[in-house]
Image (cartoon, grey):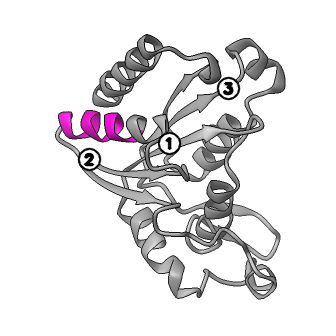
Amino acid sequence: MRVLVVYCHPVPESFCAAVRDAALEGIAGKGCEARLVDLYAENFDPVMRDGERRDYNERAPVDPALAAHIAHLNWAEAIVFIYPTWWYGLPAMLKGWLDRVWAKDVAFSLDAGGRITPLMGHVQKIAVVTTCGAPRWWSHVVGHPGRKTILRGIRALCAKRCKTLFLAHYLMDASTPESRAAFLGQVRQKLQAF
């Protein structure tokens, strides 16, 4: 299986970087081919400019900086999103990537009546692996907006029976070496099985 790993964290030595590495190990352990998109390392521009927004419903993005990202989406059979949950949602960089890359004539078509037809049927699996400062119970009270964006909204553009996986290390600010090591082991194991 071809697995696109979309990684979003600004600090190279962060725990999220260790999560990324554990995820790549789990994917390799399954014998899958992986591609890594590191949004901060490549200085991805998440800002949709006025001209791009004006053309959004008319055609696929024409910015040459997005071509490689679109090619990665077209290549992928599974996508793993790895990011920290900030203010209960996605980092702005990742949200901007979704806004700009998951666009018309890339991820969906749009007819004259405004009806959306998914174009990502080749994506069979989506996983979210995240860290979260809040406890699990509070994240549920708030509604897990980041989780819903990807595992409901983005998934709706993928294969009809697209499988999902959600892994989160809650209470990250109070984490211990033991809790972090256990989570890394879980990431390796779950992604290898997924």
Q: Which residue is mark 1?
A: 82
Circles 3 and 2, Cβ within 8 Å, touching? The answer is no
Residue 20, given in percent of the width and then of the height, sits at 39, 41
Work out which quarter of the rendered image holds the C terminus and state it.
Answer: top left
Type of amino acid under label 2: Met
- The reply, left or right, for residue 43 in relation to residue 5 is right
Disc on the earlier residue, 1 or 3: 1
Any magenta on residue 179? no
Of circles 2 and 1, the one toward us is 1
Do tag 2 and tag 1 residues touch (Cβ < 8 Å)? no
* Position above or below: 92 against 25: below
- Work out whether residue 54 or residue 169 is closer to the camera in this orientation and state it: 169
Horizontal arrangement in the rendering, residue 174 relative to residue 180 (left or right): right
Say few, some or many: other residues with alpha carbon within 10 Å of mark 3 (under 14 / 14 to 19 / 20 or more). some
* Disc assigned to residue 133: 3
Span shown in magenta? 20-30
Q: Is residue 180 above or below residue 47?
A: above
Determine the secondary structure under disc 2: loop
Badge 1 vs badge 3, beta-carbon distance below 8 Å: no
- Comparing labels 1 and 3, the label whose residue is closer to the camera: 3
- Residue appearing at x 82%, y 19% in the figure: 141
Q: CA distance from mark 2 to mark 1?
A: 18 Å
Q: Residue at x 65, y 35 (%)?
A: 147
Indicate which disc, 3 or 2, sits on the residue closer to the N terminus.
2
Image coords of residue 75 (percent x, y) = 35, 63
Secondary structure under tag 3 reads loop
Residue 140 position (above or below residue 41): above
